[in-house]
Image: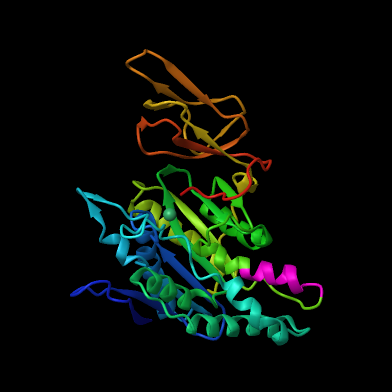
Amino acid sequence: MQTRNHPLISPTLGTARQITSFHYGPAGGQKIYIQSSLHADELPGMLVSWALRRKLAALEAAGKLRGEVVVVPVPNPIGLNQHVLGHLAGRFESNTAQNFNRNFYDLAALVLPHIEERLTGDVEANRNAVRATMREVLDAQRPKTELDSQRLALQRLSYDADVVLDLHCDWEAALHLYTNPDLWDDVEPLARYLDAKASLLALNSIGNPFDEIHSFCWSDLRERFGDRFPIPNGSISVTVELRGQADVSYEVADKDAQAIIEYLTLRGVIDGTAAPMPPLAFEATPLAGTEPIVAPASGVLVFRAMYGEWVEAGTAIADIVDPLTDQVSTLKCTVSGVLYARHRARLATAGMEVARVAGATPIRTGSLLSQ
Ligand SMILES: [Zn+2]
């Protein structure tokens, strides 16, 4: 195991932060990149990273790693230091209001001007050419802020990984994941091992979140050049939502870490036989098919349906109780699917999205992610 430190731009006098990466196994084979808690107040993944590092250390000592596994348990030290009146606020940078999981360097746009003359009829050579170009364009970036230097440090670690896992969580949720539809066949075994209750597919949900800047580049190049040059899925990138913010326990962290180990064993990164693949809990659905359940007015939010459950169209998801007018508004879903996430707040404000249901038919366009 190697430990590497990547200093960030110092944002202010007397302050300096760094990203620390841990590298297991030999370089030169497959490369796996795993980070946790990019939104700094989403801690389940950080405990999974910790559990995973112990398992990887044991596997490395036993000589069972065939590829390199890079773990970045703390990819957002900036966010971890943002406390407001006793609350950790780790989703947006306090200085710019930018979401820590948006606005990554757009690999597709950066690679495009340089790649066409480097492509050939050989798929492996094209994989290498695209990655070499990615490295060059990332090396050419000159970030000016601490936040941009953090984004660049992470991308320089991950751009050439065959598999990229970005471990997040929701407010209150069943385990679910986001990935590119081109990758579903490769991601489905991971969804099975993790027992994901929803798998949400989108090619480009707008905003350049971490997982998409990896996979979208390859999909975009295939769209543009695929009729002349073979372009592989060079990065199987997935955002995994490890349930809700409070779901931090040794038991689930060990279970999730072991699921990732089984997936890496199945992919041949770890020597051995993977555990039998469990059934897929629910079919994958388009991210554009998810229905936000929105409060029409303010009041006390009382949920009537549990996350992780299948709900039929018309099911009562929650009530909004107004103690001044005595009005009780019942919010119902209009699509059938898994209720996969709920808000953590219990005071609804007018227009607040309080839950999401994974419907099977696309009903939304434009920016598909929440703020
Ligand atoms: Zn997140």
Front residue of this view, candidates 305 and 171: 171
Q: Position of residue 170 (x, y in %)?
A: 43, 47
Q: Position of residue 339 (x, y in %)?
A: 53, 37
Work out which residue is located at the far left of the displayed protein and give it: 14
In the rendered image, residue 12 lying in the magenta stretch gets the answer: no
The residue range painted magenta reads 217-227
Tell me the quadrant of the picture where the N terminus can be found.
bottom left
Q: Is residue 302 above or below residue 145?
A: above
Mostly what secondary structure, the magenta segment? helix
**Left or right: 56 with respect to 106?**
left
In this orientation, does residue 211 appear? yes
**Left or right: 49 with respect to 164?**
left
In the rendered image, residue 219 lying in the magenta stretch gets the answer: yes
Q: Position of residue 329 (x, y in %)?
A: 46, 20
Q: Ligand 1 is found in which quarter of the picture?
A: bottom left
Going 40% across and 62% down the picture, which residue do you hit?
36
Going 48% across and 21% down the picture, which residue do you hit?
330
